[in-house]
Amino acid sequence: MVKTLKVKAPLGGWNTRDPVSSMEPGDAVSMVNLQIDTDGVSIRPGFTQFVQLMSVTSWVNSLISWKTQYGERLLSAAPNTAADHRLFDISTGSASLIKSGFVGSKWRARSMSGRLALVNGGDQPQELNFTPGSGVTIRDLAITGGNPNPEAFRVIHVFKSRSYFATGDEPGFWYSEVNALGGTLIHFPIDRVAETSGNIIDISSWTRDGGSGPDDFFVLFLDTGEVIVYQGSNPSSAADWALVGRYKLGKVLTTTQFGGKIHVVTDQDYNILPDDLLTEGIQVPTKMSGAARDAVRRDASDNWQILFDPVWGWRIINVPAGNIREQHILS
């Protein structure tokens, strides 16, 4: 195990005149097998394998944490063949097959009333239930309404007791009735609202109180880098749905909600919303901005991930790098 700290100067040397791009000579651009500690750095502890998926032939594409009334479950999905992607329950450290024969395994998930809904942009959306006696059961998520192709949904979100869906390639989203996960959906176009004619590639929400309350905001991310923010609980009611903000952020690769805010990987930096939207995303770059731009130039796929370590207080960016992964850590 390497126990040395690698410190590299930026190309062209240290910039001592520009406070925006300057770095202290002691700052580490790269640390190998070391982790940040309160008093300096310590040796990285390594890892322990949790489970082996014996019936698949490629990488695990999804890990989904699902909180049920009976405790937390952990699901994973991976391809066996191009036409046989499989979904597993790995909660106990052994793999139990839930269903096979999917065309994709990059699932996105949201839960409501103990049920979990999954979408991947290629298969019929799925609904999962869990009871100790029956284990995990699965069926097609019931969806009706104006959308003729629910298999195209690859974005799902739950906001103020409604479920929301988007395909990623149209300027609009679909929403359910109150307290419904799927069901009859209604289309909400945004082409007259968006200034950049973009398509919705992600849906999220932020809140001022760190939880789910009346001050939550509904946030749409477009493939043009535009961010559109609504407030309210019923898109069908002009009295209870209002546009409150429109911003330009940059190309978004992935988003994660944590602590009442949205953490975002863009092609410019690792942003935190709404903080960075107060200045249209033009803030003093973080010390990771250069590494972020370089990493996105190498791989702008949908394989990025944002994780949080509550013990160390880290925000971990899981960066795709060919057949391996790098981690960018911010504390």
Image (cartoon, rainbow, N blue to C red):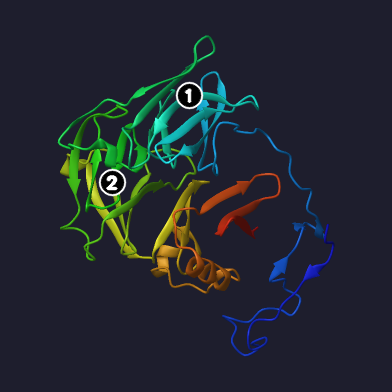
Q: Quadrant of residue 166?
A: top left
Q: Looking at the picture, which amino acid does disc 2 mark?
A: Thr
Label 2 sits on residue: 167
Label 1 sits on residue: 98
State if disc 2 and disc 1 touch (CB < 8 Å): no
Residue at x 56%, y 80% (from the top left corner): 20
Q: Quadrant of residue 188?
A: top left
| 143 versus 2 height, above or below | above
Instruction: Return the x and y of residue 231 as percentages of the image width and height.
Output: 29, 47
Residue at x 17%, y 40% (from the top left corner): 237
Residue 41: which disc?
none
In this image, 110 relative to 199: left or right?
Answer: right
Q: Regarding mark 2 in the picture, which secondary structure is present there?
A: loop
The crowd level at tag 1 (other Cα within 10 Å; few <14, some 14-19, many 20+) is some
Q: Regarding mark 1 in the picture, which secondary structure is present there?
A: strand
The residue sitting at the top extreme is 133
In the rendered structure, which disc, 1 or 2, sits on the residue that comes first in sequence?
1
Residue at x 48%, y 72% (from the top left corner): 283
Q: Looking at the picture, which amino acid does disc 1 mark?
A: Ile
Instruction: Return the x and y of residue 183 as percentages of the image width and height.
Output: 25, 27
Quarter of the image where the C terminus is located: bottom right
Quarter of the image where the N terminus is located: bottom right
Quick check: can you spot residue 145? yes
Quick check: can you spot residue 113? no
Instruction: Return the x and y of residue 241 as percentages of the image width and height.
Output: 23, 45
Residue at x 41%, y 63% (from the top left corner): 277
| 81 versus 131 height, above or below | below
In this image, 145 relative to 311: left or right?
Answer: left
Instruction: Return the x and y of residue 86 as percentages of the image width and height.
Output: 47, 32
Alpha carbon separation for disc pair 1 and 2: 25 Å
The crowd level at tag 2 (other Cα within 10 Å; few <14, some 14-19, many 20+) is many
